[in-house]
Image: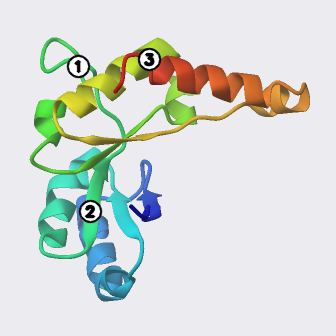
Amino acid sequence: MQKVPLIAGNWKMNTTLDEAQALIREMLSELDGIKGVEKVICPPFISLAGVSSMLKGTSISTGAQNMHFEDKGAFTGEVSPLMLKPLCRYVIIGHSERRLLFNETDEIINMKIKKAFDYGLYPILCTGETLSQRTNGKAEAIITSQLETALDGVN
């Protein structure tokens, strides 16, 4: 089986709903015409439903920028896999900004990966070292550790 490359555009905390929909309208026909790669757009949560609706019937998938590892509960501001399932196919997990700014550990990332698979979502697992770790020759060890922990118990 030949693997198809995946290209995901993470819009981070940019664009309002109106701006996101205008951007999709502007680039939809050109993006839809690109063949040979899986295309994923990951807008901010506030735009996910609108963008997902606009991309139905195209060759472009939607992805969420993050996901909590619980189905529901008192987790203010978080988004569960139940909420994402009808809106997207992919979810970014382990982004360096989530690791650094929100102190997400490899163990939390592992729980998110498992939960994504439980709900039929495809995780886009991010790994990487800091500049300091790279400079000190620890990049390979850091990435290996991240992968081993993130994928522990995943078939």
Q: In the rendering, which numbered label is found on residue 61?
A: 2
Residue 50, how many percent across, how many down? 15, 61
Q: Name the N-terminal-most of marks 1 and 3.
A: 1
Mark 3, residues whose alpha carbon is within 10 Å: few (<14), some, or many (≥20)? some
Q: Name the N-terminal-most of marks 2 and 1.
A: 2
Looking at the picture, tell me which residue is in the foreground, 79 or 91.
91
Q: In the rendering, which numbered label is found on residue 76?
A: 1
Q: Is mark 1 on a helix, strand or loop?
A: loop
Looking at the picture, tell me which residue is in the foreground, 65 or 32.
32
Q: Distance between the residues labelled 1 and 3?
A: 28 Å
Q: What residue type is labelled 1?
A: Thr
Q: How far apart are marks 2 and 1 (CA)?
A: 27 Å
140 vs 27: above or below: above
Q: Is mark 3 on a helix, strand or loop?
A: loop
Q: What element carries label 2?
A: strand
Question: Which residue is farthest right?
Answer: 136
Q: What residue type is labelled 2?
A: Ser
Quarter-of-image position of residue 117 = top left
Residue drawn at x 83%, y 32% as measured from the top left: 134
Q: In the rendering, which numbered label is found on residue 152?
A: 3
Quarter-of-image position of residue 35 = bottom left
Is residue 79 something one can see in this rendering?
A: no
